[in-house]
Amino acid sequence: MIELDRVSVTYAGAATAVLSDVDLRIPEGEMVLVMGRTGSGKSTLLRALNGLVPHFSGGTLAGRVVVDGRDTATHRPRDLADVVGFVGQDPMAGFVTDNVEDELAYGMESLGIAPDVMRKRVEETLDLLGLAGLRHQPLAQLSGGQQQRVAIGAVLTTHPRVLVLDEPTSALDPLAAEEVLATLQRLVHDLGLTVVLAEHRLERVVQFVDRIVHVPGGALPVEDGAPADVLATTPIAPPVVELGLAAGWSPLPLTVRDARRRSVDLRGRLTAVRPPEHRAHAVNGEVAATKDLVAGYPRRPVLNGITLGVRSGEIVAVMGRNGAGKSTLLRSLVGLHKPSSGKVTAGEVGLVPQVPSDLLYAASVRAECATADRDAKVPGGSTRALLDRLSPGIDGDHHPRDLSEGQKLSLALAIVLVAAPRLVLLDEPTRGLDYLAKRRLVEVLRDLAGTGHGVVLATHDVELVAEVATRVVVLADGEVVADGAAPDVVVSSPAFAPQVAKIMAPQAWLTAADVAGALAEARA
Amino acid sequence: MRPQHLITHPRALHPGAWWLWALGLAAAASRTLNPVPLALIIAVTWFVVSARKSTSPWAASYGLFFRLSLIVIAVHLVFQVLFSGHAQGLTVLFTLPEIALPEAAGIKIGGEVTLEALLSAFYVSLQLATIFCCIGAANALGSARQLLRYVPAALYEIGIACVIALTFAPQLVVDAKRVREAARLRGGDIGRFRRFGRLAMPIVEGALERSVDLAAAMDSRGYGRTTVADPRARRVTSALVVAGMLGVCLGLYGLLGGEAGSWIGLPALVVGLGLVAVALVLGGRRTGRTRYRPDPWALPEWLVVASGATAAVMTFWQVRVDATTLVLASPLDVPPVPPLACLGILVALLPAVLAPPLPLPTHEGLPGPVPEEVAV
């Protein structure tokens, strides 16, 4: 179905190729995951499949990309619209019309498909993706998962043979992500569609895919093989695979179910061992507190009487579905949102917003750091020093927009930290981060807590919570429904339990590293 | 009879019909300064909007336009009081302190305020307010955005640009708010100009990124695939459109202004419309696009357009028969009732019944009928 023959891509003005000599054959009906670090060329590979690279992006493509017999050298993206359906990272950014039904029809209108055929296909697609109840809804009013499904539906109506998705679940909460992945699974099974997707959150997708293409970046060759084989050697792997590696299972399990069946023996060995408690080491005085906090909009309160205290040394994870009030809570703590009643007491607070680049407006990293020094009235070079601790080796001449997501986050965090806040708030910090950047973030957060900061993060990322949180607060409908140590809150929750907890239940292990540590201790 | 011809069959009326109806009323309003027909037109638009508006977000725009028209009247009156000109009428209401300006300035600030001046200013602004209400009604009943779906194929590119602009504008406001908050987080006391520079950067960059994303998405979805590029045909079409629009503008100016020579009125309008029609047909042939589920144009649409046209025609007829009932000789007169115009405007009330009722929205997320108690 898809053939890449010695493909190299070099963007205009770049010294080195993004992809070099990629050979790849993807047969019909496969679901393929493309993984790799940010900036490794994943997106370039995906965009080469429908000709956006090089027709839209510019640059030079050597070699041949042939999809369903059409060579992208002679076919522009629009000429491949009926063969390849391409869904970008942010579904909202790709919508042309304003309601669900028109959006589904848009592609067919452009291709000039007969009205009666269009009518039939729209109805079929509405049913296939479970969107029938939403057909007249404005797109802006849909939830993230629904928007993603509409974006998929909108390219499906032209009956493509291949579906290409760039990080389809990175912005979604765990349940919405499951909804989207289940949809993709159904398309592969029922329609025999070939699906190629890129995703950082391996734990969500690995169980669904038939094959993994690993793009390591740099000049290294692209690896390609069965999921278990590829994940055994790559530096990045989902927790279920890490647990498999720690326990020495072979072949490696890919799904929680697999691992659970295999883990009887492991659980037996660990019955006597107490899992780590994930509590803060040294907790000191309160750095922020809310009392009976009500905030939101007139006649639509988002927070309904929240009483909460954060102490220094704690890392508090605030979880809950989209719209539960996580962001409003953070914004109230930092003073951006006036409470309608109740009280917020907080000292120096710094917030890293959901889109870190909102904080960045200078033309170079150096200028950005200098501005931050001036704003915070600290000696010159302080921000740069912080940045080098968080993420060493960023060139001062780079434009902040050209940094990777992880580097942008580090820069924004450095700018916030230079004002020496006691409490640091992070809104969805792992959006768009790859595994290595996430590992760095975990170290940074622990470091912050160790140096007496209070940390609060609002997140959907259950694996991050398992790794780093010393306390978990679950919000629903503007109220606190659970508040306690991470193992107590997440282990029993079907939505918020990390993979390792699901495998090891009823024992309260949260991460593969915990299990590996316990095993090493038992051996010693 | 097919169901779309029934005025009782629940469906959304073609937005074009609502706009033509509202244009008819606006044309009627443009011919008179008599507050009686003007107030009647406002009442008619209000009644029809209340009877036939949907639950969509834009349905609230009538209230917005109504408030805007009140502001128009208020501003006009305030300016009239401040810059009252010289000697309009004899009934002095009150006298404001006057600021002496050289005679050559041609205006005076403050001074005597007469009832005549106030009333005539009120009537003029009422006319403008009425036209605002007509536009508001059209937008509330069939939003401008809905109407854009029906731009002729030849103007498709312009239409899609407008649709995208309508989506981007609110998005830009949201972006600006987000970035401003982020800037507050960073703090730092800086001047207003530098702050503006700081904020503009991320907003503009964000907008640019979004446009590039959208362009990529549109390209991957087949945008522009069926367009046959023939530069000569395109140039001919553009020339015809421009010439035609010029004709239409001249014609409308002649008709509504009512003062220019007779050749400028109806003949120019007809020729202009003809040219535009030819251009659109020629241009439309170039694109191979199809249209998904267009709203039908059936009997109710014709009836609604006819009722709006009746209001316009009857008012124009009133001008022929007795123009003094439409433009008062003296603002102090008790406004007479122009029978023909009022009758025509009342006919425009009929869409409250002639337009089909809107279907009840299906229950959130669940296809199928609304539960009984909700429907009641």
Image: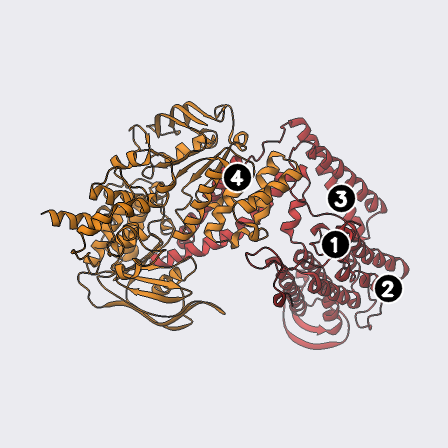
Q: Name the spot of residue B53 as percent of width and height, x first.
A: 67, 60
Q: A60 or A65, which lies in front?
A: A65
Q: CA distance from mark 4 to mark 2?
A: 62 Å
Label 1 vs label 3, nearer the camera: 1
Task: Chain letter for mark 1, please.
Answer: B
Q: Name the spot of residue A109 as percent of width and height, x first.
A: 61, 38
Is residue A330 placed above or below A235 in the rendered structure? below
For disc 3, the neighbor class at 10 Å (few under 14, some 14 to 19, many from 20) is: many
Q: Name the spot of residue A354 as percent of width and height, x first.
A: 37, 53
Q: B364 or A251, which lies in front?
A: A251
Q: Colour of chain A?
A: orange
Task: Chain letter for mark 3, please.
Answer: B
Q: Which residue is mark 4?
A: A155
Q: A35 or A285, which lies in front?
A: A35
Farthest right residue? B321
For disc 1, the neighbor class at 10 Å (few under 14, some 14 to 19, many from 20) is: many
Q: Amino acid at mark 2?
A: Thr
Q: CA distance from mark 1 to mark 3?
A: 15 Å
The residue shown at (54%, 36%) is B221
Badge 4 vs badge 2, beta-carbon distance below 8 Å? no
The label on residue B248 is: 3
Label 1 vs label 4, nearer the camera: 4
Q: CA distance from mark 4 to mark 3?
A: 41 Å
Q: Could you tell which of marks 1 and 3 lies nearer the N-terminus?
A: 1
The label on residue A511 is: none
The answer to whether residue B58 is seen in the rendering is: yes
Is residue B234 placed above or below A337 in the rendered structure? above
Q: Is residue B240 left or right of residue A422?
A: right
